[in-house]
Amino acid sequence: MYCYKPIVSCVVFILSLFFSIDLTAQNTSNAAILDLRNTEGDEPVNLDGDWEFYWGQLLYEEDLSKKELQRQLVAIPSPWNGLTDHHQKPLPSFGVATYHLNVLLPADRREQLALKLRTAGTAYRFYVNGDEVASNGRVSKNAEEAVPEYRAQTVTFPVTSDTLSLLVHVSNYHHRKGGLWQTIQLGTEAAIQRERELATWRDIFLLGSIFIVGLYHLILFYYRRKVLANLVFSITAFALCVRVLTIGEYLLPSFISGLPWDWLLKLQYLAFEVPLITVPLFIRVLYKEFTWKYFQVGVNVVVGGLIVFTLFASTYAVSHVMMGITFLLPIICAYCIGTLLYAALNRQKAALVFLLGALTLVVTSVNDLLLNENLIQSVNLFSVGFFIFIFSQAFVLARNFSIAFIQNEELNNELDEINQNLEKTVMERTVSLQEAVEELNSQNVRIADQNEELIQQGEQLKKVNDEMTSSIHYAKQIQKALLPSQQLLKKHFGEEGFFVFYQPRNIVSGDFYFVEEVDDKLIIVASDCTGHGVPGAFMSFIGIQSLTEIILKDNITSPELILEELHEHVYNSLRQSTSGNQDGMEIAIVCIDYKKRELQYAGAKNPIFLLREGQAELIKGDKTPIGGDIYKKRVAYTLHTIPLGDEQITFYLYTDGYPDQFGGKNNKKFMAKNFRRFLTLMHKDTMKEQKRILGDNLKSWMSHGNEKQTDDILVIGFKL
């Protein structure tokens, strides 16, 4: 079982540490006066509280004493959105304002003081006792002249009196919120510098930690592409790196001088939006059976839309995106926590550790969201939460590596034991082999005598083989003589109207074709007999002889009746009812009736393929082959009739030799579907060209797979 107490303790400790950062004691001003005369120590003081606020005016120190000024007190830090002017009208997002605060210092404090300034919405000038000490962007009453900027900075100034007059000019024409929306800190130069360095190093630590973890997971994904969780996790980590750079101490503008403000704002929002997709996706990859697919799809669509909007919309429009995230974040967080809780209850591996890390991530995400909406006073903690989430992930990885290491040690111990037993076994086998060698030597003598005898037998076998080969070649001549002359095909289709691609696997073939003319009809047969070589050739002789008798003697021309008679001939010729012989043939028969202008087809397993005006049609034969004792003596076959009109139709009859040929890069069958697609692609070529293409393609297909021909091949094509 997992030991979770260290994880929980680390989470509590780290959260306590980071939540304590920047939350120093605050002094609240009263009537725009902050009294620090009784403050002890040199810790920075947050200048939070009531400030004097002058809307629509850029005032200077000498203007503040005028009685006609419209003055009101506002709480800082907060935007001016939601405030009202002296006519009780809500203030707009765009405009200018002056903030003022008097700070009372101890009488004996004359050392150099400093201010830590973050950002304001969206440009400011800061004055101390009438002297400008800092600025961000360009403040102007004219929207065209105003320039926004986000840049954290510290400034020092001498103390010449017991009272500090702090005056700030703020303008905003680019964001939905304006005003002093972040805490300003006052302290000694050393204290402020220490505070800035601590915050900067904290951001650098987070940036480096998250970046290294993200890079580590990206490298893992590079070497193990199947583990998608590593890629998703690395994307999330890099998005969080961008967020660390664009909030807090705003390190990115320090690294990239002159970075446009609108780019910085969009990067800040994108870095918050991307994890809204990747975090639930990461959980889905790990615990797919406990997640809901359509929720992830919905999140991808909605947040993806926000990302596109952020990339291409104006900065003012983009600044409203956080309102949509405010609605989405609780839903996504609840879904993630619910999924991890469900997985943990089902005792899924490491689910409880992920749940603890995810809870921290949710709390810090909500903190950042509320902080961005100025609903709470805190600091950005989303990066911290993700760091803790990474810590939980690292704990699981360390545990997995530890288990793998222990298993490796156990395997090594088992391997050592096996090696020891293997040495003993090798010695025993060596003795046995020596005895076997002696036995082999004695056998070699006998084998030498036998070899001489085998040589003599080999010469006799060669003589017999030559005689058999000669006989088979003679059988080839007989089979060739039995095959029909192509003159009859030329008579009906012309020189260019047909082709016969006939390629036996051996000297003689089990495939044969048959052509006969009866009155106004032309009968064409393409047949594949059982086996190939000599057995197939014998079956082809039976087939040709039977077809000749059925068509010419019995005067049967209807294809389905020819098949029925042929089945009975084969069944009786091979005495399959008593001999147990199962040989037969797969055959396709067409009868072209020129008087009726139609083509009749029937098939025993072999199909007919035709193309009419570019449209392909496959007519399959019946599943019952010719011959075989498993079928009844009398079998019925189906007749198909194809009308012949004015349009040209290309017909193909073929056996299974071409589709079943092995080859290609993967050394697989060509396949019937690919063969028909191949015929479709070339059917507009001349028949002579089609025959050449079939031969070239077959050679290429076999050469890629280094294969020999596996079966007899027969393809007949003709056009009507």
Image (cartoon, rainbow, N blue to C red):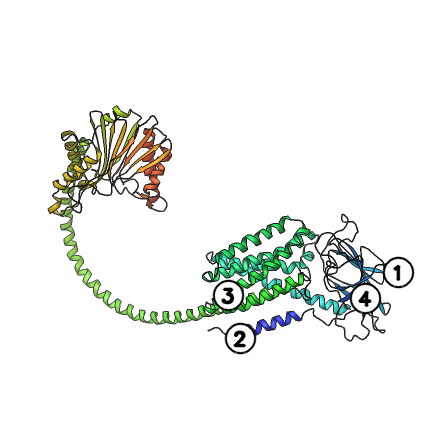
Residue 227 circle label: none
Of tags 3 and 2, which is closer to the observer? 3
Amino acid of disc 3? Leu
Tell which circle, 2 or 1, labels the residue nearer the N-terminal end: 2
- Is residue 28 visible to the viewer in this orientation of the structure? yes
The vertical placement of 374 against 674, above or below, is below
What kind of residue is marked 4? Ala
* Residue plotted at (37% across, 69% down): 415
Residue to which mark 4 is pinned: 32
Circle 3 crowding by C-alpha within 10 Å: few under 14, some 14–19, many from 20:
many
Q: Of marks 4 and 2, which one's residue comes earlier in the chain?
A: 2
**From mark 3 to mark 2, how far is it between C-alphas?**
18 Å
Disc on the earlier residue, 3 or 1: 1
Horizontal side, residue 63 vs residue 218: left or right? right
Residue 132 drawn at (x, y percent): 82, 59
| Residue named by callout 3 | 340
Query: Among all residues in the image, which is located at the extreme front?
Result: 88
The residue nearer to you, when weighing 417 against 208, is 208
Instruction: State which quarter of the image contains the C terminus.
Output: top left
